[in-house]
Amino acid sequence: MSEPIVAAGLFRTVMAAAGGRCQCTGQCGQAHAKTEGRCPREHDTYAGKHGGPVRLMAAAADPSLTDRQAASLPAARLRAWCPGCFTAAQRTARHTNEQRAEQGGLFDL
């Protein structure tokens, strides 16, 4: 299995917990309906006929965290993500946070 040069032990722990499969369950905006609600991408496999190899990453379970906040998280607060799901989940989280900020607490009780 390919792994990063830095923090390989942490990466292995996260991948073992995930079974080597992306742990996105829809945070990216996709229902992943054909694969029982979880992304089908597996580490070091091919994404399809025309896709390259999938390289999962260990990243924050909460995609709204900044890179600085995520850098110090323990393995229990990390998840295995494929790059596509993680990028889309971050975009969705940012958009949601921007909408909340625009409302200025109007609907907070």
Image (cartoon, rainbow, N blue to C red):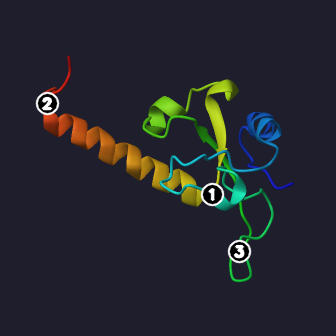
Pointer 1 residue:
33
Q: Amino acid at mark 2?
A: Gly
Pointer 3 residue:
52
Q: Which mark is residue 104?
A: 2
Dot 3 or dot 1, earlier in sequence: 1
- Left or right, 78 with respect to 45, comes to left
Q: Residue at x 20, y 22 (%)?
A: 108
Picture coordinates of residue 72, whole percent (x, y): 56, 27
- Left or right, 14 with respect to 25, comes to right
Local crowd size for mark 2, using a 10 Å CA cut-off: few (<14), some (14–19), many (≥20): few
* Quarter location, residue 102: top left
Q: Amino acid at mark 3?
A: Gly
Q: Residue at x 74, y 36 (%)?
A: 14
Disc 3 to disc 2, C-alpha distance: 43 Å
Q: Note whether 105 is above or below 100 in the view shown.
A: above
Dot 3 or dot 2, earlier in sequence: 3
Dot 1 falls on a residue whose secondary structure is helix
Picture coordinates of residue 82, whole percent (x, y): 64, 55
Which dot, 3 or 2, sits closer to the camera?
2
Q: Residue at x 47, y 54 (%)?
A: 29
